[in-house]
Image: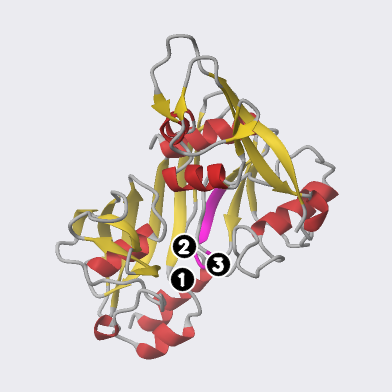
Amino acid sequence: MSSIKHLHASFDIPEGGQAMRLDHFLSIKLPNKSRNVIQKHIKMQMVLVNDKKSKASYQLKPFDKVEWFESFRKLEELIPYDYPLDILEENDAFIVINKPANMSMHPGLGVYKETLQNALQHHYNVTNQPTALIKDCLVQRLDKDTSGIVVIPKTVQAREHLGAQFQGKSTNRVYHAIVWGTPDPQKGMIKKHIGRNPDDKMSIEVSDDGVFGKEAITHYSTIASYPQFSIVECILETGRTHQIRVHMQYIDHPLVGDKRYEKVQYTANTTLQNSIGRHCLHARLLHFDHPQTLERMKYELGLPDDLKEIIEKYVK
């Protein structure tokens, strides 16, 4: 797909500045970017030093100019998706949506339509909002099959402000999950590194000794327990990929319907496991500071109908 190159950030190294590797400097200046993303960006020549390509190991000198570019796909390549979004709030700075299950956040991996970004493109078109951010607008991600509250910034300023809040752990994020069995203890904290296994890049898992991955912290509390499964509230301190799913699997209480992180020996009902069509995880609460007024914004939702139906059908 064709793309356009856009200058995202520029930095001038002052006289007397401390010598520092280019990648380390960028990790300080762009805290929302991982070291891996930064190094890939440099290799793709999306970082220039004094208008020239450079290496991650380059030692910056006084008066060097560092420029960080972003690549954006052209707007017309995002196919608008006419979908009735469940909008909890919308203003000039952001839009808060109750994302349904079975909807990806953005195109990728062969999925180019019927994602949340495609639906936003349609929404902004019909509501005459041509300047609303659509590319690189995500500061929060929910898995395709996770339902619930997500905030999408509509301006660059809102994106940077909200992104810093998620990175700095000043947001409140609460999820409800239906898991197999009853956790023992029923309340606790899981503090285990999560990442891709170096020997199997497709596997995201807990690293007991912290050799790979990043620290991940999940607080959980059992709020209802039934013969086959329990409803568990999970509060995130960190936001790693598949964090709740991996952590709950680690303590032997994987999510109902989660085929990727299933532990067959703990699946109490194979009919339910194979018929639900998604993992049972719902983002029910999100608090953050308004990027313009700094007012604390609070959004809460109950369980969606499909998860309620599971409880009603299988609790006897």
Residue 200 rendering spot, x and y as whole percentages: 36, 70
Measure how far apart labels 2 and 1 are at the Cα level: 6 Å
Res. 65 image quadrant: top right
The kind of residue tagged 2 is Leu
Nearest the viewer among 183 and 167 is: 167
Nearest the viewer among 109 and 142 is: 109
Which numbered dot is residue 303? 2
| Pointer 2 with pointer 3, Cβ within 8 A | no
The kind of residue tagged 3 is Ala
Residue 72 rendering spot, x and y as whole percentages: 71, 46
Residue 230 rendering spot, x and y as whole percentages: 29, 70
Left or right, 1 with reference to 300 = right
Q: Which residues are magenta?
A: 144-150
Measure how far apart labels 1 and 3 are at the Cα level: 11 Å
Q: Earlier in the sequence, mark 2 or mark 3?
A: 3
Which numbered dot is residue 307? 1
Which numbered dot is residue 58? none
Relative vertical location of residue 195 with respect to residue 126 in this rendering, above or below: below
Is 227 within the magenta? no
| Pointer 2 with pointer 1, Cβ within 8 A | yes
